[in-house]
Image (spheres, rainbow, N blue to C red):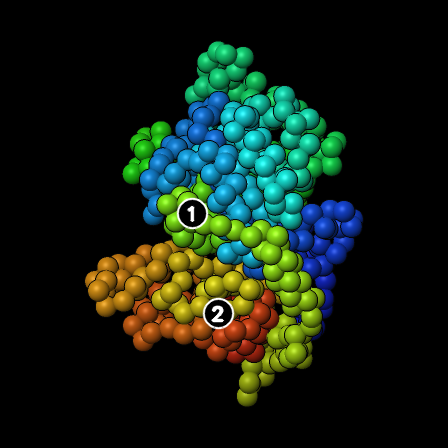
Amino acid sequence: MTVTALNQGGHAQRSGCAASSCGSTSTVAQLPDAIRAKVNNHPCFSEDAHHHYARMHVAVAPACNIQCHYCNRKYDCSNESRPGVVSEVLTPNQAVKKVLAVAAAIPQMTVLGIAGPGDPLANPARTFETFRQLTAQAPDIKLCVSTNGLALPAVIDELCQHNIEHVTITINCVDPDIGAQIYPWIFWNNRRIKGRRAAEILIEQQQKGLEMLVARGVLVKVNSVLIPGINDEHLQEVSRIVKAKGAFLHNVMPLIAEAEHGTFYGLTGQRGPTSEELQTLQDACAGDMRMMRHCRQCRADAVGMLGEDRGQEFTLDKIEHLEVDYAAAMLHRAEVHAAIEAKRAAPSAAPHAAEMLVSLPLMSKGTKTPIAPARPVLMAVASGGGGLVNQHFGEANEFLIYEASIRGVRLVGARTTGRYCHGSEQCEAGENRLHKTIRVLNGCEVVLCTKIGFEPWGQLEAAGIMPNSEHALERIEDAVAAVYRELIAADYFKQSRIETQRLTA
């Protein structure tokens, strides 16, 4: 995935992506060999890899050593997608059996993570027994852990004994006064500690753990939950500090605070950020740090590609008597991975649309009126994976949001909508989903998909969003670049000349 930019004459020029866009081909190529090998097929640490590789989480860690105002660890919620939610908690033996079954059935799966539903390091016996067995039985799978960091420094030695090259720490603040508004208590040295002192201890342990992991050569991703009015103006400082201490990637996630989830913030009316607020903060942090833009805030038992969850295909009752020949599965997985890498490395048979962004007209067609300067445009893309525009509008549960500008094409996030149409039996509900989809896509001016029905086409146009199915099965970046070129050539920006001059100054 290479960012393509237009020079001042309107010509395409290839360049490495900015620090804010981790995982592009150019960025990964610039990394040291050892780090490049660690992130190349990791869908969470590499933006490009998430188009091709899958991950899974096993829920073996029910207990937690802190309480967050945005967290409610729920069970048996198969239709709810957010961190901390699981359908079943597994023993280490059950988790290993499930991992082997999934890895055999989904050869694109490269990463196994333990992320809950509590904190993995507050359940060290269950977590490390799972890792020990997987290190021996599935040596080709990357192992990851996500933690709040409170217990991290005490278990660094054991953590590094396993095949664990990636750790995620959730760090929402470096100021105890802000932390006291996020964490009502922690459980530390067999005591429940509250208030500012609790936040002080947690922050100290998080920073110490981060430094220790970096010293051991472990790649660290920092997750931060954006909470409007509480830490929104503080997260730039968090980003600056964790970068200085060696964190590899920063993932700023939106607060999920619907009342039905039963969290403190949800019940007290704390709002989540808008898409615009999230992107603005991510862009502000990007000056200091590589930013993760493709996070899906996965369940603690998620299975499959980012943006999908196949966990219900691998429940305990379905794998209980399943026999897996993992030696044969590893050979097949290696073949599949080699084919993926060959595809990623091979140039497209056709010229990239992005490379064709040349010789843009300086005047509107048939006139001597100069074309208005081109401002950035957000485009929503329906994609089922592979880095392609390859999904019907009505089948999309989520849309990847790309920004096209004279500086290039970049992924800025993903927005979950839910399918608006599941067939004739849900037509009435489908209408409501369509309205929700249009609301979720607020701010986007174009939707790219393979096909779209007459009704949604009309409603999108009425909402000021242009449907486009003319670039089906093209690489996303090339399709977005091609549409942006078409907008420029059609003098699309003429109506907002003053605004675009301000934005491109």
Position of residue 42 measured from the top left corner of the image (x, y, whole percent): 62, 50
The numbered mark, 2 or 1, whose residue comes first in the sequence reads: 1
Whether residue 152 is visible: yes
Q: In the rendered view, does 37 fall on the left or right side of 144?
A: right
Tell me the crowding category of disc 1: few under 14, some 14 to 19, or many 20 or more residues within 10 angstroms, Cα based. Answer: few
Q: Nearer the viewer, mark 2 or mark 1?
A: 1
Q: Position of residue 123 (x, y in %)?
A: 51, 26
Q: Is residue 257 visible?
A: no
What residue appears at the point 46 percent right and 33 percent down from the top-left corner?
91
| Residue 321: mark in rendering | 1
The answer to whether residue 367 is above or below residue 203 is below
Question: Relative to residue 454, is residue 380 drawn left or right?
Answer: right
Location of mark 2 (residue): 390
In the image, residue 214 sits, relative to residue 504, either above or below, namely: above
Q: Nearer the viewer, residue 153 or 372?
A: 153
Residue type at mark 1?
Answer: His
Quarter of image, res 12: bottom right
Q: Quadrant of the N terminus?
A: bottom right
Question: If the image is split into quadrants, where does the C terminus sit?
Answer: bottom right
